[in-house]
Each structure stands twice: as structure tokens, then as C-alpha cells.
Amino acid sequence: MSITSALDSARNSLMASGVQSSTISRNIAGASSTGYSRKITVLDNLPGAGVYVAAIQRAASSGLYSNVLTATSAAATQSAIYDGLQKIASATVDDPQLDQSPTAQLNALKQALQQYANAPDNTTLAQAAVTSAKDMANALNQATQTVQSVREGADADMKTSVQNINQLLSQFQTVNTAIVKGTIAGDDVTDYLDQRDSIVSQLSQEVGVTMTIRTNGDAALYADSGAVLFDKTARAVTFAPTTSYSASITGNAVFIDGVPVTGANSVMPIKSGKLAGLAQLRDTDTVTYQSQLDEIARGLINAFKETDQTAAALPNVPGLFTYPGAPTMPASATVSVGLAGTISVAASVDPALGGNPNLLRDGAISGNPAYNYNTAGNGGFSARLQQLIGNMDASQPFDATTQGKPNGSLIDYASSSTSWIENQRKTANDNSQYQNTLLDRSTTALSNVNGVNMDDEMSLMLQVERTYSASSKIISTVDQMLQALLAAVGNP
Amino acid sequence: MMSANYISTLVLHSSLRYSITNNQAALSKASTEATTGRFADVGLQLGATTGGDVTLRADMSFADQLVDTNGLVGGRLDVTQDRITQLGSTATDFLKDLIAARSTDGGGRIILPPASSNLQDLIGALNVSYNGSYLFSGINTQNQPITPYQAGSASKNKVDADFLAAFGFTQSSASVNTITPAQMQTFLNGPFDAEFASPAWNTNWSSATDQVMQSRISTTEIADTSVSANQTGFRKLAEAYTMMADLGNANLDQSTFQVVVDKAIGLVGSAITDLATLGGDVGTVQQRITNATDKLKTQKDILNNQIVGMEKVDPTEASVRVNTLQTQIQTALALTSQLQKISLINYL
């Protein structure tokens, strides 16, 4: 009977409108949260019975979503590197105007020597030169400390990052299970899907990640290197932190599911995310800069070395600048790991330690008279000092693996080191800005696809309201019709 | 609905946020640059060329240092030159006196006071100290180069001993008038000359070294910047003055006295030439220092210009940037509040 059918259709329409308005209110509630994706009520028609809610879908774009993940990871890598390099650069170079760089310190030492060479009998100038040498050694010691503390910071951040990853993976597991169960049961899992996406977004901050969707909405997660983070179950990400660093210590690798993913021996090295940035900072950038500092220290020891002044042909020995390995000279053109942290001014020249600053002019700082350049003890003897100034300007070989100038004066090498760190910082900063812009664009594009427009939802609400009132009107009309019919039939 | 025209409310309301934070960071940078005229973060801006910048700064400050030390070296050489000139003019006067005294009766007595005072002057001039070190000491700058010529000093003792050994009596003895010109000639050219030649000179008269002070006067040049008291000119003067002051000339026979005077005239004449040459050498070094200093100053200016060129930001450009950014931020803020008002809710 068609009147009953009209009633049924109107009733179904009311039901559908109810679901539609509930979807709209969910959308409005989620309009301002970043991870929320718009829900769409899909209506369908049954012949003769009117509309029904076929499904609740979510607006999504897997392509744009993976762009966002990639940009998030890349931005996190660059900003982790930039932050570390920034700390080092501001402690060791800072504004060139402030004359804090190793180059400026070396030049200050050269100037002090020049003043002393001009009046070699002036003990005050001798002391000033020794003080300047001590400043130089201190600056290298402190730079080493700064570099190593940045490595310690990176290591601690890696630990936090690994904890975050494990926590996110266990949340992922819970949500993923709910999705699989819900999908099999035919429930609305759209909110769970949002939640899962948001967990993956957070994960992409820590490590570059790709998600593959399989049957029943089940997802597998892989790190950008291909290491499995989640497949049916969460895989363990492990890392043994190192709390204290020196130049000779190599940090531990991060393992995903037992496979090393950072460090020199990594099988599947991760490429992006905060974790990858921190690992690069800890294992590569800081290590290279430390080796440059070590080469500056070695260059200093070499420039101030003393040669045998007798016919005995004794080997060269460290002079003004010395280190725990003295009296052997450090190997030429090879990094002595950690030398910048241990270089010091010989106690025999340091007036604060009871030494004689005039040994700088005379030689035999090492204590052996064979290395005395000024055997006559003349107060105006300046040849050795002129030689030292000349040595600072003379070209010497440096270890090419440090990425500094392989051949040049000590000052040139120190400048090339400054260039290196500032260039790394500039590159990291440029990349970071580019990736952040890209992230902003990708996020905007994604939000414009899966986000909520309040005005659109409101107008949709008006539409639903009209449908609802029209359907109600139909029900009351049908009711009146039936009433009229019953009145005509029932009351003779 | 997923058309290019669709925009989510979240994006609509937050799109300006990114531009505001970005512009605020740029504003802080631009205002620093406008006030200082240099890049806000020089290292970040220059990147790989930062090393060049710090090298230029080091070169500039070393050039500055060399200009300072050249000033001190210049001062030392000025004093040296002054002393040499003085000694030269004293010697010239003395030469005139000698020529006059040669044929004068009692010339030995007349020439004695200027000779002994000139000897003291010579020793005093060579013992001059400047800024805590002795100028004519070579590199033995902590010790007075010339031993004073006085009773008991090594130099006088040796001259006395030589005289006694040659003639059998002392200079003050009345017997000096018995010395023949030939005997005197032998004495002067023999043991007396030897006193003013090495090694006796270096033992009895002078503790100066032949090696002189060397100073770096430019980044590459090292110059000899002092004069040693062992220079032949000084020795000849010392010999001539000693000869005229302490060989008992007053009582010598006239012909023997003339032998002494002739020798002294020869020595002083040659010493004057030596001193003139020495003064010329010192003048050359002074000229080199002046030239080096001029070059260093020019170099400093060039380096400074290069540094400024590398680090400079046009302050006008930077302040224009500040204004533009301010306008942009104000517009963005105004738009944000305007956008908040656009909502269908307000019209339902």
C-alpha cells in the first residue's frame, strides 16, 4: 500500500537525517583539531523503502598524507642538526667581530709573539705571550668540551626519541587492532583511523616512516630505510645511551628489531626524522669538527716544536705547547684524537706554575739544554721568536679526512675549519627553512582535502533540517490522510 | 566537494599564523641589521666564506700590530741615529783640535781635556738605554756594552800594563820624555792597536755582541734594527781618544807627540767616514720602516674595506625592510580578526 510506503520512506529519511546531523556535529566538533578528517555520510536508496545510511566515510588523500610525513621527518632532521651546530658555532666562532674564533686566537698569539720579539728582554711581554698561549690552549680545551657536551645532549635526545617511538608504536598497536576488529565487524572505524594517522604523524617527527595498508584496514609501518617498525606487532627499538663523552668515545647505535640503523655499522641506515638528525650530529658532524680542533692543536704543537741545537741530532720535542704524549711529537698530518682537549702550555714556561717565560725566547722548554737556542743567554735574542712567528705562517700538512685545508698555515687551516662549521650550519638552516615551508604547504593541502569547513557543514545542516521538517510534514500529512480515511470508513 | 575551491576552516584561520611568525623573526633580524649595519648572524649569512672573513680580520689586526711595533723600532732607531750623528760631529771638532795641537807647543796638555771628556762622552753615548734595554749592546741588551775607562777598570788596566811592558815605566812617569818616535810608533801599531781589535776589545772594553737586534717590520721583512758598539768607527774613536787622554802626552817629546797625534788624526778621520756610513745604514733601515708602515696602513684600509664589504648590510635597505615587515605583520593581524568574523553562524 503506497501510503504506508510513503510513511516508511519518510521514517527512513528521518533516521538518515539523524545520522547526518550527528556526523555534522562530529565534524564541527573536530573542525579545529589538526588530526581530524572530515566524515561523510554516504546515503543510498533501497527500492521502495527510501534512503538509508550505507556507510560513514572519511575524506582522505594518502598521497598528500605521505607528503606531510616526509616533510615532517625531513624538517625534524635538519632542525636537530641545526640546533647542535648552532651551539658549537656560537661557542667557538660567534660573531667574527668578537674575535673568538680559533683563527682570531691564533692571531692574538702571533701578535703577542711579535711584541715580545720586538723587545725580547722585556719579561712583561714574555708573560703576555705566555698568557696568550694559555688562552689559546684553554680555548681549544673549552671548544672540545662544548663539542663533547653537544654529543652528550644528542645522545640523551636520542634516548628520549627512542622512548617516544616505542610508546607510539604500542599505541599504534592498540589502535590498529581496534581498526581490524571494527572493519571485520563492519563498525564505523573512522575515528580510529584518524587516531592512527595522528600517531604515525607523531612518529614521523622521530623517524622517517611509511605506512602500508593491507586487508581489513591492517597497517604495517616501515622506517625510511626499510626496517620493520610494525607488522602485526610492534617491533622493539632499542638504544643503550652513553652519558659521558670524550673525543675517543663512539656512541652506541640504535637498533630496530635487532638491526642497527645508525652509526658506521648500520645495515639499514635511517635517513630522516629527529633520530637520524641526532645520530648524524653525534656520529659525523661533531666528530669531524672535533678532528679539526685536534688538527689545530697538533699544528700548534708542531709550529712550536724545538729542534736539537747540538750535533747530537736528537728528535724534535714539543715546546711551548705540550700534551700528555710528550716528549714524542704527534704523528705528522694525522689526527691525534682528543688532542685539543689535552693540549696545554708547558709548566716550565708558565709563571703561574713557577716557570720562566723567557724560555719562550731561549728554547729548552722541554728541560734538555741540547734544545737551547740562546746558549749565550743574550737578553736581546729574537731569532727564535722570529722563527716561531714564521712557523705559524709556514705551510704544514694537515689530515685531509678532517675536511679542512690539507696544506696551509695554521691560521689558514683554522679559518677553513670555521668555514666548514658555518657552511654546515648555513646548509642545515637553509634545508630546515625549505622543509618547514614544504611541510606548511603539504599540511595546508592535506587539510584542504580532509579538513572541515564550518560554513559548509552549517549549510549542510540547514539542508538536513529542511529534509527533516519535510519528512515530518509527510508523516503528519500521511497521518491526516489515514485519519480522514478511517473517519470516512469507520463512522457510518 | 574535494575541489580546488574547498578550504578547511582550520587552514583559513591559521594560514596567516605562519606568515606572522616568519615575519616577526625577519623583523627582529632586519631591525638588528638596520641599527648595526652588519648582518644579524654573520656566520650564517656567509657560510663557507666565514673563514675568509676571520682571516681578513686576523690579517688586519696583525697589520695594526706591526704598525705599533714599527713605531717602537722607529723610536729606537731615531735615538741610535741621533747618537751616531752627535759622535760624528764631536769627532769632527776633535779632528780640528788635533790638527791645531800637532804643531803647538804643549799641544799634549791642550788636547788632554777634550780627549778625556770625549772618551767619557763616547762611552756614555754607547751605553744609552732605551725602554729598558741598551741600544748598542747588539743582542746582549741587558748589559751595559762599554766598560767605563777609569782607574781599576779592565780596559785601563790593560792599557797601563801594555805601556809598562813596552817602556818599563808608567804614563805618569817623568821618563816618558825619553820615548823615541820609533818606539812610540812600534807601541801604537803593536800592543796598543791590539787592545782595540778582537778579541781584546770584546774582553776588556765591550760586552756587546756583533749580532744586532732583528725586528719584523712587515709580514715578510725582517730587518737589523740596532747598531753594535763593536762597529769599527766606535773602536777607532775610542782608540784615538784614549791615545790622546792617557799616554802621558803632556810630557812627551814634541816629535814623539807628533807620532801619537798623526796616528790619532788618521783614526779619527777614518772613524768619521765609518760613522757616516753607519748613519747611512741606519737611515736606510729607518726609510724601510717608514715605507713598510705606509704599506701596512694602506693594506689595513684595504682589508678593512673588504671586511666591511663582506659583513655589510645597507642600513637604508634594512630599514625599508623593517617598515615593509611591520606593514605586513599589521595587515596579517588585521586580516586574522576580519577572517574570524566571516562565519555563516553570524547570519543564521
Image: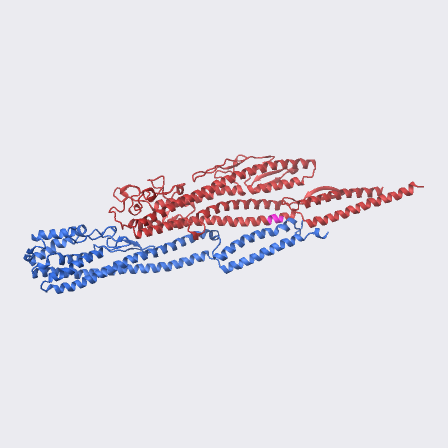
Chain colours: A red, B blue
Q: Where does residue A304 sit, x and y in percent of width and height?
A: 33, 46
Quadrant of the drawing holding the C terminus of chain A = top right
Is residue A487 rendered magenta in the image?
no
- Nearer to me, A168 or B197: B197
In the image, B81: left or right of A222?
left
> Magenta stretch: residue A444 in it?
yes
Q: Quadrant of residue A366?
A: top left
Q: Position of residue B54 (x, y in %)?
A: 42, 52
Residue at the spot x=58%, y=58% of the render?
Answer: B327
Q: Give B124 or B62, whichever is nearer the viewer.
A: B124
From the image, give the main secondary structure of the stretch colored magenta. Answer: helix
One can see residue A87 in this view:
yes
What stretch of residues is rendered in magenta?
A441-445
- Image-based side of B169 in relation to A53, left or right: left
Q: Is residue B272 above or below residue A446?
A: below
Give the camera-side residue of A206 and A396.
A206
- Residue A393 shows in the view: no
